């Protein structure tokens, strides 16, 4: 009986334990689709706002996004988790701002869409992500 209880505790502890994977996502390109509701389709240049590299932390074992540009785990809603894609969103309802993400698990390409309902802005940015190790 004690062996069974010990095994169940180990099994449960293994499922709860997080296996964090860190993705270093380098800005690749982007464009401003709308600004103040006006369609611009303006190409962004490195150094402009929203062109910073990003870090994403994912727990693939438990299918959770731990940290993402735009928000933390408690704010993240996962829309799709498949072998090919992971997509999630973060909605800041008080500010009427949303971030929508789609990670291609094969190519490592991350797409981010920023939507501002008040200003009617839409910005699309793309990143190339690689696994990285936490150094500290």
Image (tube, rainbow, N blue to C red):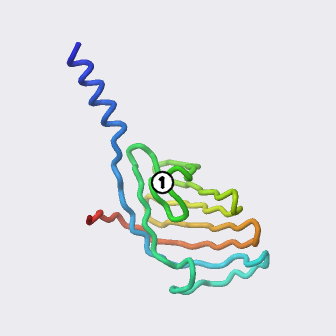
Residue at x-position 55% and y-position 49%: 78
Position above or below: 53 against 136:
below
Outermost residue to the top? 1
Residue at x-position 58% and y-position 78%: 30
Outermost residue to the left? 3
Outermost residue to the front? 94
Quadrant of the rendered structure where residue 39 is?
Answer: bottom right
**Residue 77 place in picture, x, y as percent:** 57, 50
98 lies left or right of 45: right
The C terminus: image quadrant: bottom left
2 lies left or right of 47: left
Give the labeled residue for mark 1. 84
**Residue 50 place in picture, x, y as percent:** 56, 77
**Residue 29 place in picture, x, y as percent:** 54, 79
10 lies left or right of 125: left
Quadrant of the rendered structure where residue 101 is?
Answer: bottom right
Residue at x-position 39% and y-position 68%: 24
130 lies left or right of 86: left
């Amino acid at each position: 009986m004690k062996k069974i209880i010990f095994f169940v505790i180990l099994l449960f502890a293994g499922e709860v334990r997080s296996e964090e994977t860190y993705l270093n996502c380098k800005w690749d390109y982007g464009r401003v689709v709308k600004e103040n509701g006006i369609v611009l389709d303006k190409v962004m240049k490195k150094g402009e706002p929203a062109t910073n590299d990003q870090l994403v932390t994912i727990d693939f074992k438990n299918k959770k996004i731990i940290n993402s540009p735009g928000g933390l785990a408690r704010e993240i809603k996962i829309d799709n988790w498949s072998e090919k894609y992971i997509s999630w969103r973060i909605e800041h309802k008080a500010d009427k701002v949303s971030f929508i993400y789609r990670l291609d698990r094969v190519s490592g390409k991350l797409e981010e869409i920023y939507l501002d309902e008040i200003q009617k802005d839409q910005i699309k940015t793309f990143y190339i992500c690689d696994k990285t190790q936490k150094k500290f």
